[in-house]
Image (spheres, helix red, strand yellow):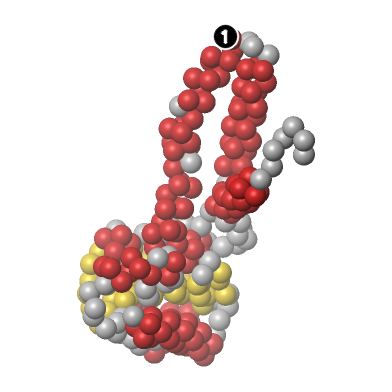
């Protein structure tokens, strides 16, 4: 290009910046962050122009603003940064070596979906709202610590009692790991993605939880009684009990096979 040298390293640099910008767009989609980013870029471009024109006073003022930009970004984008770090930390399938380092070596107990499906079917018939998180490989201790510890065996009666409208634990989510109900009244992160306005808090929380972990989240709507299931950032609506059991079994079987392959590889 003559006066502008361009190497392969520059090409890689541009690709990496493009990927990072795409990740930022995905994280901030549906929020006010893109408008804030536009404002920051406009201020930066103004600073570049002011420096080129040798406007010392304005250049100094803008330079001071930009010098504290990192701290300002942390403050302004605190929810998005927290969501991004949660996504990295809780999606352990991308960091298997960390899982192996901190693994206790104990066998994972398979979740029995029969009492969960039965409870969801009966709660659907009575339009009892429910939010059930079935943990898999992601570390959900932070979610459990935010709720009320139970450590009880999974049963249909217990799930129905927890989500009974007048029960003290009916608000929030139930966390199941293996064959145990670990905690109830857990607070889940609500998705920041664009979702239909008809979605209530439970559905938004289910999607948000599935975005930052590999957990399977089952929702029973209090308004319609419909059963939904969220996994991997996507939600399936209006699932009948038979399909719910099949879907849960499929998800759990897939993850069991993945764990088995890891153990064989190790």
Residue ID at (41%, 84%) = 261
* Direction from residue 49 to residue 264 in the image, left or right: left
Query: Which secondary structure, mark 1?
Result: helix
Residue 151 image point, x, y percent: 22, 74
Residue 231 image point, x, y percent: 50, 72
- Neighbourhood count class around disc 1 (C-alpha, 10 Å): few under 14, some 14–19, many 20 upward: few
Residue ID at (64%, 36%) = 38
Q: Nearer the viewer, residue 201 or 223?
A: 201
Q: Nearer the viewer, residue 72 or 133?
A: 72
**Against 26, is 95 above or below?**
below
Image quadrant in which you'd find residue 153? bottom left
Which residue is labeled 1 in the image?
57
Residue ID at (43%, 32%) = 71
Residue ID at (48%, 36%) = 73
Image quadrant in which you'd find residue 263? bottom left
Whether residue 157 is visible to the viewer of this picture, yes or no, is no
* Direction from residue 113 to residue 208 in the image, left or right: right
- Figure label count: 1
* Direction from residue 262 to residue 222 in the image, left or right: right
Whether residue 85 is visible to the viewer of this picture, yes or no, is yes
Image quadrant in which you'd find residue 49? top right
Residue 172 image point, x, y percent: 37, 63
Q: Nearer the viewer, residue 74 or 131?
A: 74
**Against 88, is 215 above or below?**
below
């Amino acid at each position: 290009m003559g006066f502008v040298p361009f190497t392969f390293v520059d090409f890689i640099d541009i690709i990496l910046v493009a990927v990072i910008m795409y990740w930022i767009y995905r994280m901030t989609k549906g929020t006010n962050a893109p408008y804030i980013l536009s404002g920051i870029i406009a201020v930066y471009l103004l600073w570049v122009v002011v420096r080129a024109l040798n406007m010392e006073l304005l250049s100094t003022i803008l330079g001071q603003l930009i010098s504290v930009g990192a701290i300002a970004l942390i403050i302004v984008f605190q929810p998005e940064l927290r969501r991004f770090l949660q996504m990295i930390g809780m999606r352990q399938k991308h960091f298997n070596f960390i899982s192996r380092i901190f693994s206790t070596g104990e066998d994972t107990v398979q979740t029995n979906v029969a009492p969960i499906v039965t409870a969801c079917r009966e709660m659907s018939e009575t339009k009892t709202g429910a939010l059930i998180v079935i943990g898999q490989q992601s570390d959900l201790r932070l979610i459990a610590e935010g709720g009320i510890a139970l450590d009880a065996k999974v049963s249909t009666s217990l799930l129905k009692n927890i989500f009974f409208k007048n029960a003290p634990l009916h608000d929030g989510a139930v966390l199941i790991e293996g064959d145990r109900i670990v905690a109830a009244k857990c607070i889940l992160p609500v998705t920041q993605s664009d979702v239909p306005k008809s979605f209530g808090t439970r559905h938004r929380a289910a999607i948000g939880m599935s975005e930052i972990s590999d957990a399977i989240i089952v929702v029973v709507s209090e308004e319609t009684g419909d059963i939904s299931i969220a996994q991997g950032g996507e939600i399936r609506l209006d699932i009948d009990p038979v399909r719910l059991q099949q879907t849960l079994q499929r998800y759990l079987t897939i993850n069991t096979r993945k764990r088995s392959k890891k153990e064989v590889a190790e």
